[in-house]
């Protein structure tokens, strides 16, 4: 799939055919035409306080950014904004700051969100098995955890200080979550940190291992690319658009029933293209700073983890999906 001599158009058709076979439903009245439902979600950033020194991240501890940690009531206020926009699937995201982002804090937010009718998932620092079990009981329906890179030598280079220095603790977080009963496990690598071919293969092997151990779980993949980073960090392994498309096609062919996720890190034209090939879940109208959904204007909020490239509103993304023959779903 990643070989440039392999015809990309043919590869896209193959990935599209697999997606239709696994996810396709008859939409509209045109005979022989089917699309699939596209799940829309939004990230809710709870805190950008972080003790880690990840050299590529806007939240890294030494960065002089405006820090904010949402109280439970403030988090629920952000969630209400998202729910008024249609979202029910809300992804909770936070930096790693143990004195603030405790398991008890997440549990309370999750319980309150479930009581509001939301379906929350988590993208937080790795937890113990017991903590994951408590988060599942509180209402977490899915986990997203990025290994960042599977190259241990480069991982150590990019994570010089903080709790994230432990490669193994992060790697084993997926198993701890599955053992604790997490229904859906989302894997990903941060493209740009290492050889993308090697990282993709390692992630696929990791997923095959997890599927063998926990065959009753749903699996998902996401491939965020680094577009902007703190001053002084240069992306050592840039991934071009064609290679990016090939990687998603490879995941679809290798894992026909997996959810493939695409965030607003990518520009609208590329997101539209990939949605029409193999993506089954997209974020929309995202903000990557705590409290950003209640901003009074369109300026980028202070303290972002990374800038958003696709700045369409959720309604605009949903309208494009309908025009393209998809059925947007919100939960």
Image: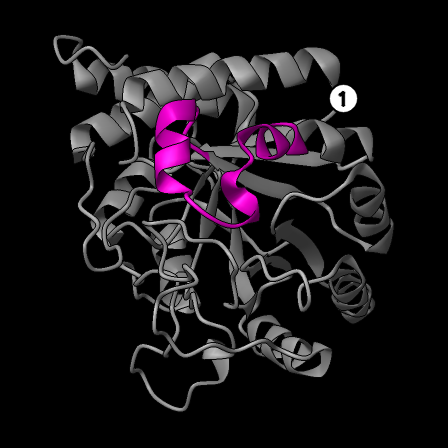
With respect to residue 230, does 325 lie above or below? above
The quarter of the picture where residue 149 lies is: top left
Magenta span has 154?
A: yes
Q: Quadrant of the N terminus?
A: top left
Left or right of 236: which side holds 93?
A: right
Residue closest to the far left: 5
Q: Position of residue 320 (x, y in %)?
A: 34, 56
* Magenta span dominant secondary structure: helix
**Residue drawn at x 51%, y 12% as measured from the top left:** 205
For label 1, the residue is 216
Q: Position of residue 214 (x, y in %)?
A: 74, 19
**Residue drawn at x 16%, y 33% as measured from the top left:** 240
With respect to residue 199, does 189 lie above or below? below
Say if residue 76 shows up in the picture. Answer: yes
Magenta segment: 148-173
With respect to residue 203, does 56 lie above or below? below
The quarter of the picture where residue 87 lies is: bottom right
**Residue drawn at x 65%, y 18% as measured from the top left:** 210
Label 1 crowd bin: few (<14), some (14–19), many (20+), radius 10 Å = few
Residue 165 vs residue 296, the one in the foreground? 165
**Residue drawn at x 37%, y 38% as measured from the top left:** 190
Residue closest to the far bottom: 296
Say if residue 278 shows up in the picture. Answer: no
The quarter of the picture where residue 300 lies is: bottom left
């Amino acid at each position: 799939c990643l070989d440039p001599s392999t015809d990309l158009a043919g590869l896209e058709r193959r990935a599209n055919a697999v997606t239709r076979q696994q996810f396709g439903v008859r939409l509209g009245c045109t005979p022989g035409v089917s699309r699939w439902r596209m799940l829309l979600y939004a990230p809710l950033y709870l805190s950008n306080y972080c003790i880690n020194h990840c050299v590529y991240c806007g939240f890294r501890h030494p960065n002089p950014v405006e820090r904010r940690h949402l109280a439970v009531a403030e988090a629920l206020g952000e969630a209400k904004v998202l729910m008024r926009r249609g979202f029910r699937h809300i992804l909770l995201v936070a930096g790693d700051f143990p004195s603030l982002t405790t398991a008890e804090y997440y549990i309370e937010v999750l319980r309150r969100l479930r009581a509001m009718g939301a379906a929350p998932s988590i993208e937080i620092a790795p937890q113990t098995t017991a903590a994951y079990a408590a988060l599942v009981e509180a209402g977490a329906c899915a986990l997203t955890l990025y290994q960042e890179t599977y190259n241990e030598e480069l991982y150590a280079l990019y994570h010089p200080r903080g709790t994230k220095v432990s490669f193994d603790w992060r790697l084993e977080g997926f198993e701890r979550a599955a053992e604790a009963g997490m229904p859906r496990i989302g894997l990903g690598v941060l493209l740009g940190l290492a050889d993308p071919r090697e990282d993709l293969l390692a992630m696929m092997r990791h997923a095959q291992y997890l599927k063998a151990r926990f065959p009753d779980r749903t699996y998902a993949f996401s491939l965020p690319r680094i577009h902007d980073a703190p001053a002084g960090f240069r992306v050592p392994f840039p991934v071009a658009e064609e290679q990016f498309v090939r990687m998603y096609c490879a995941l679809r062919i290798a894992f026909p029933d997996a959810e493939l996720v695409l965030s607003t890190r990518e520009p609208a034209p590329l997101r539209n293209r990939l949605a029409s090939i193999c993506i089954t879940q997209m974020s929309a109208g995202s903000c990557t700073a705590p409290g950003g959904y209640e901003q009074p204007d369109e300026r980028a909020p202070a303290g972002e983890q990374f800038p958003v490239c696709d700045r369409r509103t959720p309604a605009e993304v949903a309208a494009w999906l309908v025009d393209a023959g998809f059925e947007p779903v919100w939960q």
